[in-house]
Image: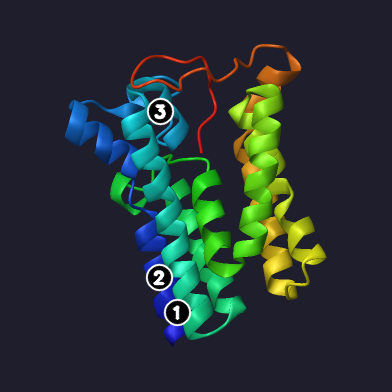
Amino acid sequence: MLTAVLVVTGYIVGSMPWGYWLARIFRGEDIRTKGSGNIGATNVWRVYGRGLGLAALLLDTAKGFAPAFLGTMLVGHGTGVLAGAAAMLGHWRPLFLGFRKGGKMVATAGGAFLGVAPAVAGAALGVWLIVFGLTRYASVASIAAVASLAVWAWLLGFPWPVIAFGAFAGAAVLVLHRANIRRLVHGEENRFQGLGRRGESKSAASP
């Protein structure tokens, strides 16, 4: 029963579209009509700058972390994984946006793994930073980082539910980045440049 409650809570918390809400509250605009049209933190950062972008990133990460951490602490890794996966699902198809298209789940997946397996999340973050530093492609860094989750979980000796969760997260993020992959293949994906307070970078990828 507790597992079911945590999974439902995970979906509801994951459904909180912080990128959309922050743009509405502080700019009076619909982020879905700006930039790539995605509600994720990268698009918020690209369109509105570092302040709102960082806020969206932290909140999207937190909504994956909270249910996964509670599930792991109160029940075990299996429940933590289910609650974290539910949060990711909520981010992708948010209840509060009428189940319409949400974000690409990267930050929420990172938060979920921070709650279930912090060492794995830290290793994947290292992969993201290295790949992003070398390529300046947020999409490539995101795909590489999330794809590494299952490998790190296995190498660090976590139980099979965590390894399976890593594989699921990697596959889901890969599917949601199909358009980015097509642009990369055709040389049309633009590098992320928006690290200032406000202004347009050229990235088309969003967590």
Residue under label 2, please give it.
8
> Looking at this rendering, what residue extends furthest in the top direction?
187
Residue 191 location in percent, x, y?
60, 17
Element marked by disc 1: helix
Along the line of sight, which residue is nearer the eye, 101 or 12? 12
Residue under label 1, please give it.
4
> Which residue is depicted at the point 52% across and 41% down?
104
Three-letter code for the amino acid on which mark 1 is drawn: Ala
Q: Which of marks 1 and 3 is in front?
A: 3
Along the line of sight, which residue is nearer the eye, 153 or 33? 153
Q: Mark 1 and mark 2 in contact (Cβ < 8 Å)?
A: yes
How are the colours assigned in the image?
rainbow
> Which residue is depicted at the point 65% across and 12% down?
188
Is 186 left, or right, of 55 in this rendering? right
Q: Is the N terminus in the top left, top right, bottom left or bottom right quadrant?
A: bottom left
> Which residue is depicted at the point 73% across and 76% down?
159
Element marked by disc 2: helix
CA gap, disc 3 and disc 2: 29 Å
